[in-house]
Amino acid sequence: MTKQTLSLFILLSSTACIQNTYEYPDCDTQTTDDITDSSDIPTPSQDLEDDTESSGSNTDTSTETESTEEFAKAVQYFFDDAESLLYVQVYKDPNALGSGLAHNHVMRATNWTGDVTYNRDYIEDCEMNFALPVYDLAVDEDAMRDLVGYGDTINSGDRATIREHMLDSNQLNATQYESIWFESVSCQEQNGSLVVTGDMFIAGTTREMDITINFSANEDTFYMSGVIDFTHADFNITPYEAFWGAVRNSEPLKISFDMVGFAG
């Protein structure tokens, strides 16, 4: 299979703690320790590029599975945060009166799980499911702020306050909705991309979304990466504000992912 291009969307949920229909292994709701250096952050797409360059090939590593059968079989690939990266960026409103005192934010998803089923010969076999506990979002780690190019850091006390606001009832409402999840409904291939239609659940609202994905697949691994913009309004959330609107968040938000899954 030749290399394909895409741009994806996914968000968050966990199994032991969620109200979706897909069953995942039990999740650990303890927050993962901070990543202390940006070089420790998983970058599967860069690994894929490095492997391609070291092989002396300019072609994609997405190769067809060799088989004596006429048609390939569906392969299920499993993902987690040990090898992959999923994060959300929230931006301050630059037009707010107190914007100079505010920050852009980045939240890295931890303790999440997901899986993709893909068959290069039979797209109807395609499925995609991801889940993560909102309490395990790591807020404004120094390494992540460095990775996304913010150029500053936030002290631990302010990070704790930001996390508290993020989980509050008027934002993610974590007390009532402990998870965010995505479950596919259908897949199709369009112009060399994989387009996944599915349901995303955030803060009590389920919304159907189309996800276009850059991917590279073989019998052992499935690489995918992309970025998607969405708004607070998509999930009936009001952007956070303080000091009577002098500090407030803006639209849109951005979800980025760089993932590699392994055949199970």
Image: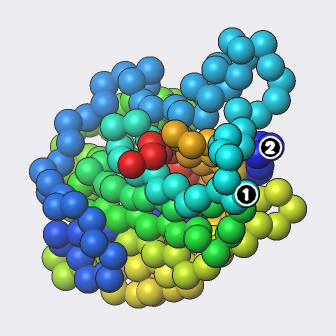
Q: Residue at x 52, y 75 (%)?
A: 184
Q: Is 161 drawn above or below residue 16 in the view shown?
A: above
Amino acid identity at mark 2: Thr
Q: Position of residue 20 (x, y in %)?
A: 31, 81
Q: Residue at x 28, y 72 (%)?
A: 23
Q: Residue at x 57, y 25 (%)?
A: 47
In this image, 135 relative to 98: left or right?
A: left
Are discs 1 and 2 less than 8 Å apart at CB? no
Picture disc at residue 2:
2
Q: Position of residue 116 (x, y in %)?
A: 50, 59
User: Helix, strand or loop at disc 2?
Assistant: loop
Q: First in sequence: mark 1 or mark 2?
A: 2
Between 194 and 137, the residue placed more toward the observer is 194
Between 87 and 216, the residue placed more toward the observer is 216
Amino acid identity at mark 1: Glu
Distance in Å between CA atoms under marks 1 and 2: 19 Å
Q: Position of residue 115 (x, y in %)?
A: 43, 58
Mark 1 closeness class: few <14, some 14–19, many ≥20 residues within 10 Å? few
Can residue 142 be seen? yes
Q: Residue at x 19, y 82 (%)?
A: 176
Q: Position of residue 18 (x, y in %)?
A: 23, 76
Between 61 and 264, the residue placed more toward the observer is 264
What residue occupies the far front of the structure in this picture? 68
Mark 2 closeness class: few <14, some 14–19, many ≥20 residues within 10 Å? some
Q: Which residue is mark 1?
A: 70
In this image, 71 relative to 139: left or right?
A: right
Can residue 92 be seen? no
Q: Is 30 drawn above or below residue 49 in the view shown?
A: below
What residue occupies the far right of the structure in this picture? 191
